[in-house]
């Protein structure tokens, strides 16, 4: 067990190094130096070369990478030449908003998708199952922004129930209590996640329903409610642990588009603005953070699975 | 005990079982799969939708000449009516012509990138599964590395710099979506390579390349074709997202995402024709691909076959 966890952490570190080399190399190949952005488009080559030399952008690729990683380990994410602010402080201002949006959506989707999947599996091939499956199938095929647009059109512009723009407040507390403006972004991201989670949950619950221990539990006279709660739910949730870990890149992508659509000043919108004005260090840092979150998410999911599932006992 | 088996096994059909030296009618696995597919109504519906959109996008412009190139400021934001069956955009372009133009881009990118992804994935997966050992370990770690990268972010970053044409976007999306097919093909090759027919081919003197191209990949073909349909659906969603965020194709090429992001600005004015038709197009094509994929998976998976 301990050996497995240590080995798993070791693999994660190897992957992390690979990911950082790849992302840094790719961005470096695309945008070799931010000199033009700093000096202006009319800077001549002599000036650019001098600036590159002064800021270390003329060094070999590997040296720049090692310096960047060294800075990262000391908590320095680089400098945004466009916004003239350190990337760490930029992220520090907005990360809580993204965490609230994504966290609320993730928790809501798990809370809704798990019972929904179990319900569909138990009552499979009934009207309820067909309706839920079809809805999930349609939402699953829908681009995030189109889903958000429909919600805005119906619930904000026609019915006036909610705001069409996310909360613009600076304090996290007032964002959390601002149900009027935060409902639509959270619901958009939640619906999208439920659509994929409930599909997996349904098939996972159906697999478990066919197991012998469910038959045993029923045969010994356990009430159906307890069969579902104690035997089905726990076992059917195991694949969900892996699924949540694997779905982090999709959550981040959904978060990016939702924040852009609802003009919610979080990490996603920051990344979007950085794309527009080619803010190299912001792009690099956020992509790396996304990769780190994915790797950590997968690591935690794997370890949680070995702890939760006694059948998995790897040496 | 007999009750457990009764539900899952069909009764033995004695009349059709070949006797003695006779051989029953030969039916290839593919023909069985096609029949199974044709019996699935949803799959046929999906195929119908997809064919409709291919015809709509590629043959449609031959018969319908709408204006999608010159802005016409007298005819902006017209509701659907005579001359413009689906209304006009904020620059006076004909929405129906734009839909066709966008459909071409979406379908082309979808199929090209899926083809790239499956080719790359099948090669890496087959080599990795067949070679084993250190090659396998290195290739699979590379797959792990790519899977940990937030895909959309990297595609956006590269698209800002290089994305402009159907080809470059296809290459870009294909280059980041070969990972799942690689893993699937590797798994399939791992189970296939210990089978007798592969050993027989090896004994007969097949080299690694011939083993992969003549024996392993054809047998993993069903798996690959199922994956292609899902890849097409994903790629269409990705290019729509790129277009919506404003980093997709460059004018005069347009895709459905561009149209949607144009329409968003006018949704408050009630110009529904700029948003809902194009949204419906995206959703329908993606649903069609997913339906076909699900049905293909069911019809190629012998265990799930009803008979």
Image (cartoon, rainbow, N blue to C red):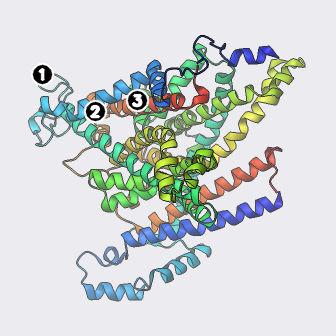
Q: In the current view of this chain or complex, which residue is farthest to the top?
A: B15
- Secondary element type, mark 2: helix
Q: Is residue B93 left or right of residue B127?
A: left
Give whichever of discs 1 and 3 has the lower sequence position: 1
Point 33% across, 73% down: residue: A37
- Secondary element type, mark 3: helix
Which label sits on residue A115? none
Q: Are marks 2 and 1 in contact (CB under 8 Å)?
A: no
- Secondary element type, mark 1: loop
- Vertical position of residue A293 compared to residue B256: above or below: below
Task: Measuring from the top left, give residue A8's x and y in whole percent.
Answer: 72, 60
Kindly identify which chain the residue marked by label 1 belongs to: B
Which label sits on residue B288? 3
User: Does the image show residue A171?
Assistant: no
Point 75% across, 47% down: residue: A305
Point 15% across, 35% down: residue: B76
- Vertical position of residue A5 compared to residue A197: above or below: below
Which label sits on residue B54? 2
At label 3, counting other C-alpha atoms closer than 10 Å, the crowd grade (few under 14, some 14-19, many 20 or more) is: many
Residue located beneath label 1 in the image: B82
Quadrant where the C terminus of chain A sits is bottom right
- Structural distance between the alpha carbons of marks 1 and 3: 31 Å
- Structural distance between the alpha carbons of marks 2 and 1: 25 Å
Q: In this view, does A24 lie to the left or right of B133?
A: left
Q: Do labels 1 and 3 share a chain?
A: yes
Q: For marks 2 and 1, give the one nearer the viewer.
A: 2
């Amino acid at each position: 067990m301990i050996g497995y966890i240590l080995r798993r952490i070791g693999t994660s570190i190897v992957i992390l190094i690979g990911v950082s080399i790849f992302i840094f190399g790719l961005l470096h190949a695309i945008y070799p130096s931010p000199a033009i952005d700093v000096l202006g488009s009319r800077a001549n080559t002599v000036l650019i070369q001098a600036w590159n030399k002064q800021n270390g952008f003329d060094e070999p690729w590997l040296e720049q990478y090692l310096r960047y990683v060294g800075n990262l380990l000391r908590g320095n994410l680089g400098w945004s030449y466009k916004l003239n602010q350190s990337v760490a402080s930029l992220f520090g201002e907005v990360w809580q908003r993204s965490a609230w949006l994504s966290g609320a959506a993730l928790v809501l989707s798990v809370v809704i998708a798990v019972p929904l999947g179990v319900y569909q599996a138990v009552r499979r091939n009934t009207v309820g199952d067909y309706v839920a499956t079809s809805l999930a199938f349609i939402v699953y095929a829908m681009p995030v922004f189109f889903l958000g647009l429909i919600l805005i059109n119906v619930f904000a512009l026609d019915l006036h129930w909610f705001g069409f723009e996310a909360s613009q407040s600076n304090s996290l507390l007032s964002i959390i209590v601002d149900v009027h403006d935060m409902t639509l972004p959270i619901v958009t991201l939640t619906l999208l996640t439920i659509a994929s989670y409930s599909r997996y949950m349904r098939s996972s619950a159906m697999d478990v329903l066919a197991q012998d221990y469910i038959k045993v539990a029923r045969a010994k006279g356990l009430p159906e409610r307890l069969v579902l709660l104690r035997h089905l739910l726990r076992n059917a949730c195991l694949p969900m642990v892996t699924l949540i870990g694997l779905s982090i890149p999709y959550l981040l992508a959904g978060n990016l588009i939702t924040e852009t659509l609802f003009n919610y000043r979080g990490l996603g919108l920051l990344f979007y603005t950085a794309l527009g004005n080619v803010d190299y260090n912001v792009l690099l840092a956020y992509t790396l953070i996304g990769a780190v979150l994915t790797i950590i998410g997968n690591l935690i999911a794997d370890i949680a699975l070995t702890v939760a599932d006694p059948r998995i006992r790897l040496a | 005990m007999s009750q457990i088996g009764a539900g899952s096994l069909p009764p033995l059909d004695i009349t059709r079982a070949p006797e003695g030296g006779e051989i029953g009618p030969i039916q290839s696995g593919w023909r069985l799969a096609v029949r199974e597919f044709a019996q699935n109504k949803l799959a046929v519906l999906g195929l119908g939708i997809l064919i409709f959109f291919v015809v709509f996008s590629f043959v449609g412009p031959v018969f319908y000449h709408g204006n999608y190139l010159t802005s016409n400021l007298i005819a902006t934001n017209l509701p659907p009516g005579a001359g413009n069956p689906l209304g006009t955009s904020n620059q006076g372009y004909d929405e129906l012509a734009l839909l066709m133009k966008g459909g071409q881009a979406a379908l082309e990118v979808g199929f090209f990138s899926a083809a790239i992804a499956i080719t790359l994935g099948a090669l890496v997966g087959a080599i990795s599964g067949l070679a084993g050992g250190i090659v396998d370990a290195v290739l699979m770690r590379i797959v792990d590395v790519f899977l940990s990268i937030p895909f959309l972010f990297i595609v956006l970053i590269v698209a800002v710099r290089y994305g402009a044409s159907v080809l470059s976007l296809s290459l870009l999306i294909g280059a980041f979506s070969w990972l799942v097919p690689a893993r699937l093909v590797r798994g399939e090759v791992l189970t296939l390579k210990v089978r007798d027919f592969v050993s027989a081919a090896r004994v007969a003197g097949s080299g690694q390349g011939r083993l992969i191209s003549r024996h392993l990949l054809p047998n993993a073909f069903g798996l690959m074709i199922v994956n292609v349909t899902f890849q097409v659906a994903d790629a269409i969603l990705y290019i729509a997202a790129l277009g919506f965020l404003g980093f997709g194709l460059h004018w005069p090429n347009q895709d459905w995402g561009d149209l949607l992001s144009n329409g968003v600005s006018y949704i408050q004015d009630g110009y529904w024709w700029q948003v809902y038709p194009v949204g419906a197009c995206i959703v329908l094509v993606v649903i069609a691909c997913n339906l076909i994929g699900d049905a293909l998976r069911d019809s190629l998976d012998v265990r799930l076959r009803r008979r």
